[in-house]
Amino acid sequence: MNMNLLFLDEFGKAFIPKKIRPGLGKYLGKAGIEEVPYRFFGILFWLTAVVTYFIYLPLIYPVIKQKPIIVFFILTFVLWFIVQALIAVLVVVSLSFYLNIRIYKRTKILEDMLPDYLTLVSTNLKGGMNFEKSLWSAIKPEFSILAREIGIVSKRVATGNDVTEALGEFAEKYSSPVLRRSIDLLKGEIQSGGKITGVIDNLVLNLKKTKALRQEMTAATLTYMIFMAAIVIFIMPALFALSKQLLGIIMKFTARVSTSFQSASSSSMFNFSSANINPSDFTTFSIVAIAIISIFSSMIISTIEKGDIKGGLKYIPMFFFGALIIYFILSAVLGSMIGSIVF
């Protein structure tokens, strides 16, 4: 192995405590990453250091360069550490966001493939195969993620592990109530020595009914989801853009009225001051409000559509950036239309 790559691997390991490595490995395994990418963490450190340098040089160094030498070095160390740590946290949070979406998608694929896979297992059992061989023979390329996971289960069984333990580890790997309940039913029937074929057939029937019911519920609530999406992406930014222009009109009006009062009367009883509001503050407020509304709206839509919040993570970028683009476009259009108004 290249010495530079080996250095990055060892360097990345130094930043991952041994206590959290097993948990990190399981978390990444849910996303389909079999090994902890220590090399990535090593590269991440150097990338954040480079970014920190370009932030430090123009923004921090000119402020602290006149300090005494000891104070200068202390401030440099502390501020460098804070900036680099913040950048690393931002990158890790973004990656966690991506991995959570990926884990959610993999879990849903597993749940969708499970009835068809169990149907093949039942067919193999009825053909005279034992349960372990039925699991292995039912693996097909079209089952993708489920095929790989069952392949791991079969390899553990072949190396001497109990089939119920291997299935239990597989079920615990994913946060899927459907998968866990299905595996628990299979484990219970295996341990009791009952007729597992009938249990699998009933399980497949219930899974298909549940899937069909969810699709019907999604179709029934489609109108509400479209309405909410329209409010978030179009109506909300339009109202904020209109409010921004209204604020500008009010500020112009109050400024003219204040000037008229000051020139017409010297009495302090009729002192009319102009509005002291910065339009850029309202723009910042609008962006923050759009972000908050986009996050919670995506969660509500995901709860209506799929019954959980995690599925709404993929909607957040679409809602936020879509609403933001509409907001700036309408602000520019309305500004050019209303900007010529003179009181």
Image (cartoon, rainbow, N blue to C red):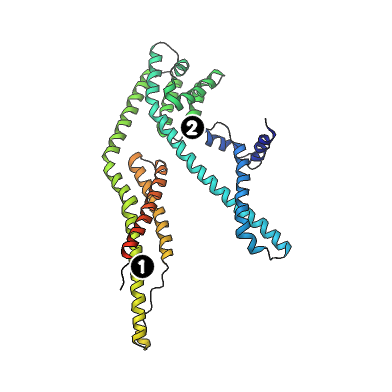
Q: Give the amino acid at mark 2.
A: Glu
Q: Where on the picture, by quarter, is residue 340?
A: bottom left
Q: Nearer the viewer, residue 14 or 167?
A: 14
At x 54%, y 18%, the residue is 158
Under circle 2, the secondary element is helix
The residue carrying mark 1 is 248
Residue that appears at 62% across and 49% down: 50
User: In 3D space, how far apart are the residues under numbered discs 2 and 1 (Cα atoms)?
Assistant: 57 Å
Tag 1 secondary structure: helix
Instruction: Note whether residue 188 is visible.
Output: no
Q: Position of residue 337 (x, y in %)?
A: 31, 62
Give the x, y percent position of residue 202: 34, 23
Residue 89 position, x and y percent, is 56, 48
Q: Earlier in the sequence, mark 2 or mark 1?
A: 2
* Of labels 2 and 1, the one closer to you: 1
Q: Amino acid at mark 1?
A: Gly
